[in-house]
Image (cartoon, rainbow, N blue to C red):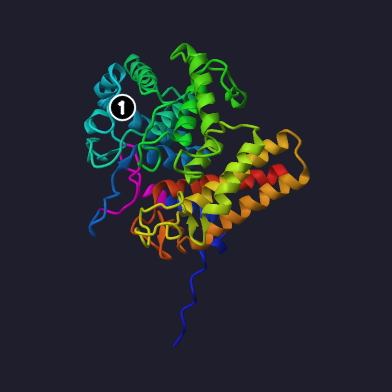
Amino acid sequence: METALPSPSFRDLPFDRQIQLAYDHLERLRQLNGGYIASPYSGEAGYDRYDVYWLRDIMYATYANEYLGLYDKVKQSHRVVLTVFEKFHQKIIRGVRKKPDLQRAKGAVVHARVHPTTLEEITDEWGHHQLDIFGLFMFKAGDLMKQGFHIIDTIERVQVVKDILSYLWTARWDTEPDFGMWEEGPELHASSVGAVLAGLTMWHDHGFYDYKYRGRVDISAIIPVSERFLEDGARALSRILPRESESRPYDLAQLSLLWPYNILKDQFALQEEIIDNIEKHLVRAHGVVRYPGDRYFSTNAEQPFGNEAEWPIGLIWLSIAYSKMLAQAMRVGASSATVARYLERAKQHLAHVEEIATPDGRIAELFSGGKPNHNLPLGWAQSLYIVAKLSLREAMKTAA
């Protein structure tokens, strides 16, 4: 009787095969309207269902398409998010007129999660006031517009985005709390302030992002952003950093400041402090802890410190951050030792996540007690893996 040979690990597969497998799993989560469900899990074991839309997840999930040059899919995904904002435009307008009371008025804010077909809201049970979603949308919508992809293509859609801008002002995004990337709080989060600051900067006529565009598309003429917004946001962010919030000295969500937003461009000491804190305090055997004492899927919710769930996406994000920092370092003439260190860390973190992926390239939401939970694969983790893989290849070329 022949003994079956073990299947190769995902880490041992050829580069192109890794990309294809990761993308195939991502594509299975894509819906006809262009959005991505967070995970195939439908809630049958009593946990919260994930086969629905999170607006943030959709925008991160389609990043893989952008890095692969599939811009039709990128545009369609962001238009799904814009359609949700259009659907709940009246909520945004009410928020412009009067800042919602986050403790009492649960139904007063646009929900972070909606049904994938009807786009209706699903639950009010947790905090939906998540300003980074608006920041990410404005950042990517502006970025796509500057690249020549006119996703905000009607007067009505321009008005929705203008009202989002007014909503952010009324909500006092730079001084008032939100529920952040992990839907917990309310608290003032550096990752949320940074996301909005990046989004507003993208629309400002002298934004920090113009250097990468082949042509100049002055989107500030469509939706003007005051210089004062940027000044207030930069001051607010500097007051919070290097912490994520008053209660969290460091948090996985802070990696978004390094990528995609690059809001700390060329501030190497601050970037390194943020990334060092995460590596020293949050990296574990199966991923990155979101923040110290995280109770979500903790193995001991009564004693959460040291028993937190471990998120593979954090390893992927660390790899991306190091690859992007390498490009910055090369541009300013950093030492060869610094460049080599960034490259080695980007490789190590990506190899780490490939070790804990399934042999067919699925990446779990998290590991608890050494085992993956039911959200396998997690859509935006699949997408960011592709971003990390392609970013590392580019970093290796740059450093050569």
Q: Residue at x 28, y 41 (%)?
A: 126
Q: Secondary structure at mark 1?
A: helix
Residue 185 magenta-drawn?
Answer: no
Between 259 and 233, the residue placed more toward the observer is 233
Q: Residue at x 36, y 53 (%)?
A: 296
Between 368 and 101, the residue placed more toward the observer is 101
User: Mark 1: which amino acid?
Assistant: Phe
Q: Residue at x 36, y 23 (%)?
A: 171
81 displayed left or right of 381: left
Q: Which residues are magenta?
A: 25-42
Between 327 and 188, the residue placed more toward the observer is 188
Query: In the image, residue 112 lies at what x, y percent?
Result: 32, 37
Does the image show residue 400? no
Does the image show residue 77? yes
What secondary structure predominates along the stretch shown in magenta? loop
Q: Quadrant of residue 124?
A: top left
Residue corresponding to mark 1: 85
Instruction: Residue lying at the far top in this picture: please name it.
Output: 221
Q: Quadrant of the N terminus?
A: bottom left
Q: Quadrant of residue 367?
A: bottom left
Query: In the image, residue 150 lies at what x, y percent?
Result: 43, 22
